[in-house]
Amino acid sequence: MKKIMTLCVVHIHPHVLLGMKKRGFGMGRWNGFGGKVCVGEDIKEAAERELFEEASIRARDLERVGVVNFQWENKPDILEVHIFRVSDFTGEPKEGEEMRPEWFSVDTIPFHKMWPDDAHWFPLFLAGKKFRGDFLFDEKNAILKHSLFEVEYI
């Protein structure tokens, strides 16, 4: 079964805003802000809602730059994640129940404390490229195989 998800990364060069996941799926990892698309919501609305819920900020611009499918060995679900760039926002990032926002220089992104796929697609993201990809993980979240390619539009 395919689950549609969102992921927003705030990128105001030379910095990115990431959140430390404090509970649930991905706990203990730095990540962008996002989650499930609710019934009656389109993908962009879900991305905007999740960004506000997790970081207390509202995107002034939201650009979809990637779609990546994630699957785990021996599990039927596929997570179709729509990745958005936010380069302007209102509000001040604040810690909530689920995430603790923190700014990082693009030179010091903590890939060793993120999902292993991030090291593959983040360079495309930072370069302003659009991309699609697929990642297959084992039960310990190691990448078994992947494909990633640049596209002209999403």
Image: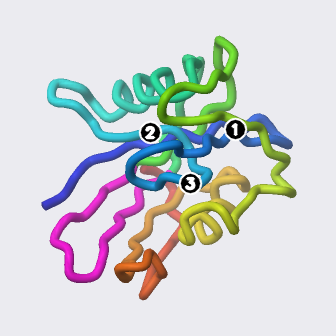
Q: Tell which of 141 and 87 is nearer to you.
A: 141
Name the quadrant containing residue 129.
Answer: bottom right
Asked if 62 appears above or below 3 in the picture, the reply is above
For label 2, the crowd category at 10 Å Cα-Cα, with few meaning under 14, some 14 to 19 and many 20 or more, is many
Q: How many marks?
A: 3
Foreground mark, 2 or 3?
3
**Residue 134: mark in rendering:** none
Foreground mark, 3 or 1?
3
**Residue 28: mark in rendering:** 3
Q: Amino acid at mark 2?
A: Gly
The percent position of residue 110, horizontal first and vertical second, equals 74, 59
For label 1, the crowd category at 10 Å Cα-Cα, with few meaning under 14, some 14 to 19 and many 20 or more, is many
Q: Residue at x 61, y 41 (%)?
A: 19
The percent position of residue 89, horizontal first and vertical second, equals 65, 19
What is the chief secondary structure element of the magenta stretch?
A: strand
Does the segment drawn in magenta span residue 69?
Answer: yes
**Residue 34: mark in rendering:** 2
Quadrant of the frame with the N terminus: bottom left
Q: Secondary structure at mark 2?
A: loop
Q: Secondary structure at mark 1?
A: strand
Give the magenta range.
Answer: 66-81
Contact between labelled residues 2 and 1, with CB atoms less than 8 Å apart: no
Q: Amino acid at mark 3?
A: Gly
Asked if 69 appears above or below 106 in the picture, the reply is below
The percent position of residue 137, horizontal first and vertical second, equals 39, 78
Q: Secondary structure at mark 3?
A: loop
Mark 2 or mark 1, which is nearer the start of the sequence? 1
Q: Residue at x 65, y 13 (%)?
A: 90
